[in-house]
């Protein structure tokens, strides 16, 4: 059955590039409904898109429609995918805050199909904390946000903010439209974030884990049809929709929850930054600071359970177990050792000393190492794309089972 894509065009110089995108989609027999904001129409006349799409271009909330009784609702219901490209800072802000004051923003709110956003703007605007916060919000609401390209911008400055290559947007649209539901009927459990260990009723120790990688995995697994359990330690992120969330505090609690659900899972991925130590004796009362500030306070630490290792011991037949190895030296060698001792099917190794890899970063540079010894090294990519590669590998192993 033919697919219908809505392309929402907002007002930036990159509007003209959408003509090429539209023509490529039409060649694939994809039905495209073009919607433009008023400012977008100042850059390229709607006639261009009307000619290429073979449909009326929608610009006005109050426009009479032959096709739909209530235009913005009818359009939203017809869509298999909504693409916003180019997405201006203003329109991203409107999306992040649910503002619906024109045709396109109203369709965005009424839409229930997946959303792809391709930002394009001046790099200072793109880097602005408000814009970044809004982009984060959209990600948390489940939108797929493409990274803008870096280069010379129309305003003469250089930096991130160029509309991603039309070919890349096209590929992404095709991927989202035809995403395989290859995890349908499978239950996947992933842990994420950092575990915390109490020192006293006020203080605790934790680590640099943010939950980004694990939350991206949960999102990707849901997209591919899995029933997902997210066991999360401390993280400030909004969990993806349609995921069953267990909030936990310490490593022991995380381990208990995961062991309980392990027998019911087909796939388990350990993306959490689990603390290796806890406080031997948690103080019942807040520890008072000493007047003599040179005095050394000794806190004894003991080991926490290695959750993945425990799960490796209790592995159910055909269950796929995946871990991470964040290393600062001898990456492959150390990762291979962990793969064996934890009885994993594959391990995702990353050298956290590299720029653009590891904790808190939005990108990661990883290698997927299998039991057979096969190593697949991936270039620097967004954590969403890394999640995709991990789930691809899981799907490949499921097929072999
Ligand atoms: O041994 P190391 O901590 O480097 O292994 C990292 C992998 O093991 C990660 O997947 C992490 O989630 C998991 N892990 C665990 N329990 C621990 C420590 C790490 O499950 N106590």
Image (cartoon, grey):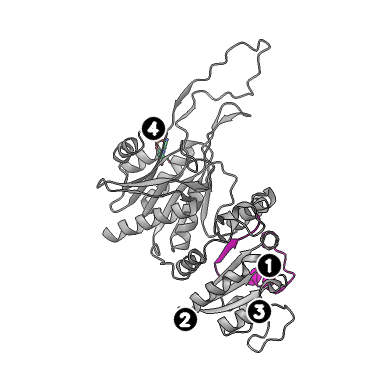
Asked whether mark 1 lies closer than 8 Å to ligand 1, one says no
Q: Which residues are magenta?
A: 93-122
Question: Which of disc 4 and disc 2 is earlier in sequence?
Answer: 2
Disc 3 and disc 1: Cα gap in Å? 12 Å
Residue 236 image offset from top left, x and y in percent: 60, 45
Q: Nearer the viewer, mark 4 or mark 1?
A: 1
Indicate left or right for 399 with 289 as reference.
left
Residue 46: where, in percent of width, then height? 66, 79
- Mark 3 touching mark 2, by CB under 8 A? no
- Badge 3 element: helix
Question: Is the distance from the Cβ of mark 2 to the nearest ligand 1 atom less than 8 Å?
Answer: no
What residue is rendered at 32% in x and 41% in y? 339
Circle 4 SS class: loop
**Residue on which disc 3 sits:** 46
SS for dot 1: loop
Q: CA distance from mark 4 to mark 3?
A: 56 Å
Numbered label attached to residue 329: 4
Q: Residue 134 is drawn in which quadrant?
A: bottom right
Tell me, for residue 11, which label it has, or none: 1
Marks 4/3 in contact by CB < 8 Å: the verdict is no
Observer-nearest of 159 and 236: 159
**Distance between the Cα atoms at labels 4 and 1?**
47 Å
CA separation, marks 3 and 2? Answer: 21 Å
> Which quadrant of the structure image shows residue 334?
top left
Residue at 29 percent of width and 61 percent of height: 399
| Marks 1 and 2, the one that precedes in the sequence | 1
The secondary element bearing badge 2 is classed as loop
């Amino acid at each position: 059955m033919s697919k219908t894509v809505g392309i929402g065009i907002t007002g930036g110089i990159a509007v003209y590039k959408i003509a090429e995108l539209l023509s490529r989609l039409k060649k694939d027999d994809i039905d495209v409904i073009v919607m433009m904001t008023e400012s977008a129409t100042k850059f390229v006349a709607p006639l261009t898109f009307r000619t290429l799409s073979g449909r009326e271009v929608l610009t006005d909330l109050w426009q009479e429609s032959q096709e739909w009784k209530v235009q913005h609702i009818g359009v939203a219901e017809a869509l298999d995918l909504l693409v916003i490209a180019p997405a201006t800072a203003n329109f991203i802000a409107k999306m992040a805050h649910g503002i619906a004051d024109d045709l396109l923003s109203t369709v965005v709110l009424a839409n229930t199909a997946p959303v792809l956003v391709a930002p394009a703007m001046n790099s200072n605007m793109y880097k602005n904390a408000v814009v970044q916060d809004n982009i984060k919000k959209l990600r948390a609401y489940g939108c797929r946000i493409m990274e803008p390209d870096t280069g010379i911008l129309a305003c003469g400055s250089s930096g991130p903010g160029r509309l991603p290559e039309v070919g890349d947007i096209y590929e992404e649209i095709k991927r989202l439209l035809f995403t395989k539901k290859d995890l349908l009927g499978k239950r996947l459990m992933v842990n994420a974030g950092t575990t915390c260990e109490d020192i006293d009723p006020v203080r605790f120790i934790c680590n640099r884990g943010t939950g980004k990688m694990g939350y991206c995995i949960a999102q990707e697994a849901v997209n591919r049809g899995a029933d997902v359990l997210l066991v999360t330690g401390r993280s400030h992120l909004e969990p993806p929709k349609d995921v069953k969330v267990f909030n936990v505090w310490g490593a022991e609690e995380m381990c208990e929850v995961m062991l309980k659900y392990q027998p019911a899972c087909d796939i388990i991925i350990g993306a959490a930054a689990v603390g290796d130590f806890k406080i031997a004796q948690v103080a019942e009362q807040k520890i008072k600071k000493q007047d003599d500030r040179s005095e050394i306070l000794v806190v004894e630490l003991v080991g926490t359970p290695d959750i993945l290792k425990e799960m490796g011991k209790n592995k159910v037949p055909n269950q796929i177990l995946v871990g991470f190895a964040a290393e600062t030296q001898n990456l492959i060698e150390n990762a291979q050792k962990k793969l064996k001792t934890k009885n994993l099917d594959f391990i995702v190794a990353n050298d956290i000393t590299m720029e653009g890899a590891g904790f808190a970063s939005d990108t990661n540079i990883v290698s997927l190492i299998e039991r057979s010894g096969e190593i697949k090294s991936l270039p620097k990519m967004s954590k969403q794309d890394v999640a995709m590669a991990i789930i691809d590998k899981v799907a490949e192993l499921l097929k072999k089972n």
